[in-house]
Image (tube, grey):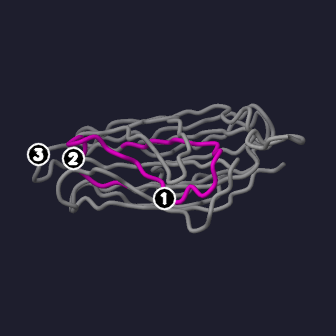
Amino acid sequence: MAITHIQSGSGSVSATQPGYLTALTAAFGSATSAGNLIVVTTITGAIYGSATPPITDAAGNSYTQVEYPSYYNDTYIGATGDVATYCIQVSYSLTTLPNAGTVTATYASNSFKGAARMFIDEYAGIPPSSVLDTHVSVSHDISGGISAPQSLSITPTNSGELVYAVTDCGSTPSGFTAVQDALVTAYPGYYQDHFYESHILSCPAGANVIQSSCGQIGVAVAFNAQTGYFIPRWVSI
């Protein structure tokens, strides 16, 4: 069974919002199906703090965090006197309950001040017994205006896998299909970074998928593809 991309959604909070961020949400436009994979990425640009928020949805599915790389940029020290810290968190759920609806990232009290963006995606064709194959991340701090674009490489084990990526490389990585993108501003007038969400729906086994210049930060995750016939675990026989 080939992996298919069903739908996407997104949500954001501006850096101009007052006070500390408490929650970030995004909603699917249509009902999700039990047994499908939901991938959730939160991107934060902070002038204060950082966080790894737990992910929940309206149906009550459980989410697993995969990667959480971060980098800081001290090139511009704004009115706050702080540096900007950018973080990408990727989480997933092989859902057992339908109608995920709104997905929420909940931040601890007084832990984060800045801007945030959420990408959510639903995929079909992921095996219930073995969801995750492999994952990687890279990051590099910018100090004194000196940057060093990173190389992001991932090698799926099996044929037909979904390779999901989020990078700040300036465009969609070569060989990937664009899904969503967002400009995240940590502090108005000072800190901005553009992030790109993309995927390969059916990657060949052993293919060394490389983005030679993924920017300062990037995440890539390979999810297994369903092969043969199976009975979903939520079906009683």
Question: How packed is label 1: few (under 14 Cα within 10 Å), some, or many (20 or more)?
Answer: some
Give yes or no for residue 100 being in the magenta stretch: yes
Residue 215 is left or right of residue 131, and the answer is left
The one of 175 and 96 positioned closer to us in this rendering: 96
> Marks 3 and 2, how far apart in space?
9 Å
Residue 182, given in percent of the width and then of the height, sits at 43, 61
What's drawn in magenta, residue-wise?
A: 87-116
**What x and y, as percent, mark residue 78?**
14, 52
Q: CA distance from mark 1 to mark 2?
A: 27 Å
- Count numbered badges in the picture: 3
Residue 49 picture quarter: top left
Whichever of labels 3 and 2 marks the residue nearer the N terminus, that label is 2
Residue located beneath label 2 in the image: 47
3D distance between C-alphas at marks 1 and 3: 36 Å
Numbered circle sitting on residue 179: none
Element at badge 3?
A: loop
Provide the residue designation for mark 3: 81
| Towards the viewer: 29 or 196 | 29
Q: Is residue 5 left or right of residue 195?
A: right
Which residue is at 37% across, 61% downward?
A: 12
Q: Amino acid at mark 3?
A: Gly
Looking at the rendered structure, the kind of residue marked 1 is Thr
Q: Which of the two discs, 1 and 3, sits closer to the camera?
A: 1
Position of residue 114 measured from the top left corner of the image (x, y, whole percent): 25, 52
Q: Which mark is residue 102?
A: 1
Q: Amino acid at mark 2?
A: Ile
Q: Residue furthest front?
A: 237
Mark 3 vs mark 2, foreground winner is 2
The label nearer to you, 1 versus 2, is: 1
**What is the quadrant of the C terminus in the image?**
top right
Q: Secondary structure at mark 1?
A: strand
Q: Earlier in the sequence, mark 1 or mark 3?
A: 3
